[in-house]
Amino acid sequence: MKKDAERRKVGGVSANALVMPIVVTLAVLHIVIISVIMMISQSSASLSGIMRDAGTQTQEATSLLAGSSLLSETSSNYVLMPTTEQGEVNVNPLMSYAQELSVDRRPGDVLARFETYDIPEEALALIREAAASAEAMMDAQLHAIELMRSVYPLPEAGPLSAIPRVELTEAEKAMTDAEKTAAARVLVLGSVYGMNKQSVSQNVNACVEQLQANSGRLSAMASRRVGMLRQILWIVTLTIVAILIATFATLYSQILRPLERFVRLIPEDSPLNEKRGFHEVRMVASAYNDVLNRRNALDDILRSAAETDALTNLPNRYRFEQYMLEWEEKDCTAAVLLFDVNYLKRTNDTEGHLAGDRLIRAAAECIRDCFGDGEEGNCFRFGGDEFAAVVKHCTPESLRFKTRRFEEMQKERDLSIAMGYAYTEDLGKTSLRALLDEADRYMYAQKAAIHEQAQ
């Protein structure tokens, strides 16, 4: 309702408001004029309806993906972190999971609404495939939650009671707690789950493309109908040239001109001007901009998820490879640093993986605090206990200052991190890849020395 209210505020004069003045002014030809203008108005309204329906259908399709992603994220968070740092059951992800289950965008609900729409069979088949994959994901999530529930009992009261229960097999009931936890993680993090998740994304995006293509075809038909009616109107204007020239000029500036610009901008994925044209044209622009913003937001979410390490919020190894490929500066000083967290395996074995995760996060914060630039995201997590940083426009003195600060911060935070770095005064004479290899050798040499001292 709020979004609809915002659309009604786009302003502009409705094309229907011109009907009565034209009828009064062109009394002699009022039958022809009224008929033609009403048909043009209906065609314009039909065009607005096509775009509005496309927006609604696209929103429904993307809501399936958004809901599936939220259920996947919350269930995975619970499986990965079933307890808080205080040792209590981590019910917050499941509260969000239960709340999302109550929202009217479950796969079956979305599919039922899509089957009532007048859309191509190809688009309906894609949304069916996406809904089936989303249902499979939910089955795996509920199964994983039930396995974790048998290890970490949940309160039955409140929103958590809305989460459907799954009957465990006798073999699953006989598992140890560690086996149940491992099985739950395979359910929500395994390859089958990943393929279903990818299927939802791919099929929803493909369905959206089909819907947009279909709406474009219907819009073209409506536009051609408007064009034909306008030609008839031109024949009538021969008898009242002066009046209809002014009328046509108004129609051209308020409908044709904006639509012509829309045709050029839409293939470029550029936003449309909502401040020009009749109200119906602005409504078309508003509806399109809404769809474009939603798609861009979804692209940003997917891109961020692909390039960010979930545990530390640092850019991941994929982003590091992109960073090196995108590097354009040649004649500048630069240093590449590699880090390896010591004793992570011992921490995991003696204190548990949650403690290991805390150690990883603490190491990431220490590296970012000492070597991060705060803007470009120059610190990265390779995976496991390995990190990297790239420092541009530095000097040997500034690097020594940063490394001393890094060593002091490790002592303050009770951390042990092996580090190696390579520096060049002219990046044009070498490459980041060469600096990375050199830093890797120094880092492993320091790590070996640290472990040798520990023995």
Image (tube, helix red, strand yellow):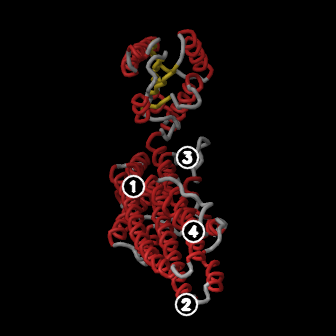
Question: Which residue is rendered at x = 53% and y = 18% of the image?
Answer: 393
Q: Position of residue 223 (x, y in %)?
A: 44, 71
Of 227 and 54, which appears nearest the observer? 227
Quarter holding the N terminus is: bottom right
Residue annotated with mark 1:
197
Q: How much space separates mark 4 and mark 2, taking CA atoms?
A: 21 Å
Using residue 273 as the reference point, say whether residue 227 is left or right of it. Answer: left
How packed mark 3 is, by other alpha carbons closer than 10 Å (few <14, some 14-19, many 20 or more), is some
Mark closer to the chain start, 1 or 4: 1
Residue annotated with mark 4:
249
Which structural element holds mark 3?
A: loop
Q: How much space separates mark 1 and mark 3, taking CA atoms?
A: 25 Å
Quarter holding the C terminus is: top left
Disc 1 or disc 2, which is closer to the eye?
A: 2
Give the residue type at disc 2. Answer: Ile
Residue annotated with mark 2:
31
Q: Position of residue 445 (x, y in %)?
A: 40, 13
Of 309 and 269, which appears nearest the observer? 269
Q: Position of residue 216 (x, y in %)?
A: 41, 66
Residue annotated with mark 3:
83
Q: How much space separates mark 1 and mark 2, taking CA atoms?
A: 58 Å
Which structural element holds mark 2?
A: helix
How packed mark 2 is, by other alpha carbons closer than 10 Å (few <14, some 14-19, many 20 or more), is few
Disc 3 or disc 4, which is closer to the eye?
A: 4
Mark closer to the chain start, 3 or 4: 3
